[in-house]
Amino acid sequence: MLDEEKIRLMTRITAYEKEHEFDEIVLSHYYREDYVRYGCLRTLVVATVTYWSVVAMYVLYRFQELLQEINNMDYFDVIGKLMLGYLGFVSILYIFGFVVYHIRFHYARKGLIRYNRNLKKFLRYIEKDDEEAQPRRGTRKEAVVGTIKVSNNIGGDDPALDIPLRRPESGPAAEEGRQ
């Protein structure tokens, strides 16, 4: 007989995994500080490449004028303005990235907590079904064919929640064990 609550849980778990497979579930392998730092580092790299690309395009666009004024320029002033502009641009994007990655982690964590709660409920259903399906006398041998891993919290796996998947053995070895 099918248990409707178990089917609902399986549907919720599968829908969440399918929808958030590459963003929130991957995020569960990071601590908040590591995730934010990694995101800010990516933001700094992109900001650096963007800024210097825009400067290069400006130089190419005004190349004729710059060649005429090259002997009259104050190089320290030009480099100072470029570096000041770079530091301002990168600082603004760093702060923006810091806020965005904190908010992303916060909302993803809420979804992961719900996902883990549903997964634990589902595993309790499986355990209950396994206990009911086990023979009372314990004469039947079973082979462990895998393990279901459950993430306890955002930081990692909880080995206490690992559930072995069992399949009854069949064939000559199982027949010998029964005798």
Image: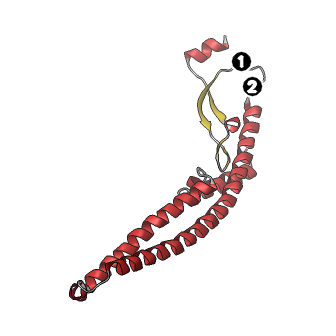
How far is the residue under mark 2 from the one under mark 1? 7 Å
Tell me, for residue 135, which label it has, or none. 2
Q: Residue at x 40, y 73 (%)?
A: 50
Locate residue 70: give its quadrant: bottom left
Locate residue 178: give its quadrant: top right
Q: Residue at x 76, y 32 (%)?
A: 131
Answer left or right for 86 relative to 113: left
Q: Is residue 127 above or below residue 74?
A: above
Answer left or right for 167 relative to 133: left
Q: Do tag 2 and tag 1 residues touch (Cβ < 8 Å)?
A: yes
Q: Nearer the viewer, residue 87 or 8?
A: 87
Q: Which residue is mark 1?
A: 139
Residue 39: give x, y in percent of width and height. 53, 62
Q: Amino acid at mark 1?
A: Thr
Residue 141: give x, y in percent of width and height. 65, 20
Q: Residue at x 32, y 82 (%)?
A: 74
Tell me, for residue 105, which label it has, or none. none
